Image: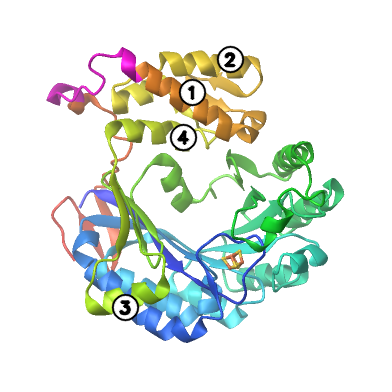
Amino acid sequence: MDKNVGIYIHIPFCVSKCAYCNFYSLAGAEKLMPEFHTAILKHIEEYSPQLDGYLIDTVYFGGGTPSYYGAGRLISIFNALKKHGHVLLDAEVTAEINPGSITKEELLKLRRAGFNRLSIGVQSSDDKTLKSLGRTHTFADAEESVKNARQAGFENISIDIIFGLPSQDKDSWAETVAKAAALKAEHISCYGLKIEEGTQLYVFKDSPFLPDDDTQADMYLYAIEMLARFGYKQYEISNFARRGFESKHNMKYWLGEDYIGFGPGAHSYIDRCRYSFIEDIEKYIERLSLGQALVEYSEEMSDFENAGEYLMLRLRTVNGISEEEYYGIYRLKMDYIIELLKKYEENGWAINKDGRWRFTPKGFMLSNTLIGELLEAQTRQRTLISKPWQTDSEDEDNQLTLFDKRPLSAEVFSGNRTERISGTTFGK
Ligand code: SF4
């Protein structure tokens, strides 16, 4: 056992469907909760042999609305992970909650069971906007949730807010940012609204009620500046945290580290293989009960695809990319990519500091386009090299092992006890 892994649990139940929501989540499906619960516990148990090789250092309950599913069921899933996997005692354990969908008593139960981080969907400080989005809470409910969470002992709270909403102007966004900061969470995720096909908001796609591109850009830059003043450091395109409170789980996605998902539609990335489970709760339940395959999509990532992901994901973070690191991992040169990054630097979209390239806030706003160009440059570079994927053993020995964390020993949950494990040979 020499690798860490993050676990994602997808809980697809919601009170109602929000107008902008493109996640796999179901409103009015409560009657499926007991069957779903049996199924996901079985899923985790069946995965026990695969989990055996890993130390679980993050667990994230997302959705959907995990808080609507109930603290008791969330704890029972967490206990299954502790039973069938090696969950580190200091693992970051997050549950997404919506204001008004969980009581103080339930928060206390979660905290006592080992949950130590909450992600609260606040979205806006304006109650009319919340209502128009189909949210079932007010901003006062969000304030109450943060207060209850603190009283329950949560010292690591994240909140989500959204800009670019219909009828939202710069003043109302400024008010949301200020009121969000006043909640004194440790972490703030600040997302730009994306209108996706299939959502209720799609009819507004080209509507004048939506802030135009320039206004949205101003809103984003305003948030970066104001959140910095409130002590939140941007560490990813949409994420801001007080020092030391960056999301360990989400960092795994951006650093290309291993994670395993459970639940309908959940994605996994493990040993350079990407796969996802069927995005249909009824089929998920049925197939688990019949012992049938759940994987809907899987892909073995080539070295070249992984190198593309390195560019795509790490440029989302303020840590960015480096020539040395890229060559160390993939044995590829970055000449064409650097050429392009220098042009971006001239335009104020990228900077190079201490050998690392990263996007500026203006670059983050254009990141989809810029990353697309960088990937094209990567492909052109590849065709120039006669031996792009050198894999002789000497080179492999010299490669950086960014994805391989090898703790010498660690304390893990073991049934109702805890135990210290070390080296590479211990089992459950
Ligand atoms: S609560 Fe979250 S997951 Fe549920 S419908 Fe709203 S946005 Fe989607």
Estimate the x, y position of residue 4 in percent, counting from the top left.
Answer: 31, 51
The residue singled out by tag 3 in the image is: 286
Q: Nearer the viewer, mark 2 or mark 3?
A: 3
The residue where tag 4 is placed is 312
- The mark found on residue 356 in the picture is 1
Q: Are marks 3 and 1 in contact (CB under 8 Å)?
A: no
Which of 112/368 is in front?
368
Residue 184 appears in the picture as rendered: no
The 10 Å Cα crowd at callout 1, few under 14, some 14 to 19, many 20 or more, is some
From mark 1 to mark 2, how far is it between C-alphas? 15 Å
Who comes first in sequence, dot 1 or dot 4?
4
Kind of residue at badge 2: Lys
Q: Distance between the Cα atoms at labels 3 and 1?
A: 49 Å
Mark 2 secondary-structure assignment: helix
Identify the element where label 4 is drawn. helix
Q: CA distance from mark 4 to mark 3?
A: 36 Å
Which label's residue is closer to the chain start, 2 or 3? 3
Residue 417 falls within the magenta-colored stretch: no
Q: Position of residue 163 (x, y in %)?
A: 72, 50
Highlighted range, magenta: 382-395
**Front position in the image: 367 or 73:** 367
The residue that disc 2 covers is 343
| Mark positioned earlier in the residue sequence (2 or 4) | 4
